[in-house]
Image: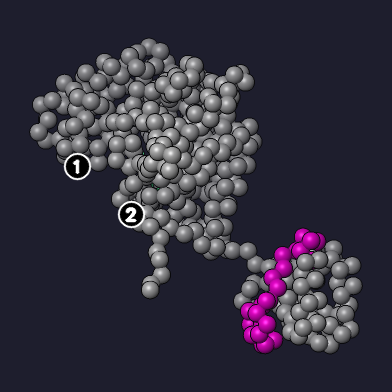
Amino acid sequence: MGIIQTAPGTRDVLPAEVGYWQYVETVTKEILGRAMYQEIRAPIFEQTSLFERGIGEATDVVGKEMYTFKDRGNRFLTLRPEGTAGVVRAFLQNNLCTIGGIQKLWYKGPMFRYERPQAGRQRQFNQIGLELFGSGEPRADVEVIALATDILKTLGLQNLKLDLNSVGNRNDRQNYREALINYFLPYKDELDSDSRDRLERNPLRILDSKNERTKEINQNAPNIIEYLGDESRKHFDQVQQLLTDLNINYLLNPCLVRGLDYYTHTAFEIQSEDLGAQATVCGGGRYDNLVAELGGPNIPAIGWAIGMERLIILLKKIKDIPSTSPDFYIVSKGKKSEGQALIIAQKLRREGLTIELDLSGSAFGKQFKRADRSGAIACLILGDIEAETQTVQLKWLASKKQILLTQEKLMSQVGELKEQLARHV
Ligand code: ATP
Ligand code: MG
């Protein structure tokens, strides 16, 4: 019988890679923490109806990509395809909206979409996301964009570009919709079949098409900016002004749209030139009507999500994050010395040192080879003689300098040892 493999579109993050994930998580947590955003952990599965209402049945995510199943109690459940709907639900269900003022939240974790697996596109993938509730001001849009760019820059990523657009409010979009339908109708037969389907239902999403001929047709489509009313126009102008004040470069992209009714005003994406076809690292926007759509009060909101896998593909190109190596590698042979080695290992770990204890029981020669490969700074050696005399050999692996000291002395000198370890790095 062969080995059972991962399901398509999923992958293991092995220890050699996990340092990248931890690095991204640490940086993100720090940057968002300094802006007083707090982490929220919502369930990984939710009632299917949450996503149907919260993302919209007309979208690909809900229409084609959800992992939905019936549980043993005949409930329809779905593995979350994105984070926003669950966070909004948690915000309402736990009355975070009544705490007053503004809520700043972030989350991280796996998302699930039934998509065609390829580089940068998986069926289980991870996002770090942020949601800001309670402020409709342009300043809020710019704060969340600035936090996303800060995270990506602090990680060291380059060649990023920020695309920006406004989808206005419901009213603006109604006018724009009509203009789009009028524009596309004469091209109806030339559009790809998905876009043809969207023509009456949701023409804005045609602008999002990846089909080459449709993209050509889109080039001369009416521009949403010209359909923005005074209020929307003013909001968008202020967002741009504040981005400029913060020295954040952006490009206006009128094809960057989110087709659903609860999206309002700012839409943005951060793309990398180093990613190939799946270039978007971060996508976000304002959704002033979603909280109400999910049964809550009228509360404006804005958020974004960063795709972790794509981020890590980029990070690997520019950074080498080695897996951790121990301070001491402990080599021991013989019943008595092996017992003492275990005790020493535990004592040193409690003192804050990183200790790898060789548990193989193999000959000294093999253990020394492993010690060299482990990346340890020094080696502690216990054989029969050391066990008998309660001593230990300490060998600095770079200089090969070796000293004998009592086990008691080893423990009483931990402070000095730490300094020496630091110097031998
Ligand atoms: P795309 O256009 O690449 O399909 P999207 O518009 O579906 O992206 P969002 O729902 O806005 O993506 O999610 C935000 C981010 O999550 C994306 O920019 C991307 O980095 C990441 N992401 C989305 N779907 C996947 C996936 N299937 N595999 C890996 N990362 C993904
Ligand atoms: Mg997608």
Task: State which mark lies toward you, 2 or 1.
Answer: 2
As rendered, which of 30 and 236 lies closer to the eye? Answer: 30
Is the residue 315 above or below the residue 31 in the image?
Answer: below
Residue position for label 2:
118
Residue position for label 1:
212
Q: Is residue 281 left or right of residue 109?
A: left
As rendered, which of 348 and 266 lies closer to the eye? Answer: 348
* Mark 2 vs 1, N-terminal side: 2
Circle 1 packing at 10 Å, graded few (<14), some (14-19), many (20+), is few
**First to last magenta residue range:** 348-371
- Amino acid type assigned to the residue bearing label 2 in the image: Gln
Residue 110 visible to an observer of this rendering: yes
- Amino acid type assigned to the residue bearing label 1 in the image: Glu
Is the residue 327 above or below the residue 111 in the image?
Answer: below
As rendered, which of 421 and 308 lies closer to the eye? Answer: 308
Which quadrant, please, contains the N terminus? bottom left
Q: Residue at x 19, y 42 (%)?
A: 212
Residue 327 visible to an observer of this rendering: no
Let me know if residue 352 is in the magenta part. Answer: yes
Q: Is residue 326 left or right of residue 235?
A: right
Circle 2 packing at 10 Å, graded few (<14), some (14-19), many (20+), is few
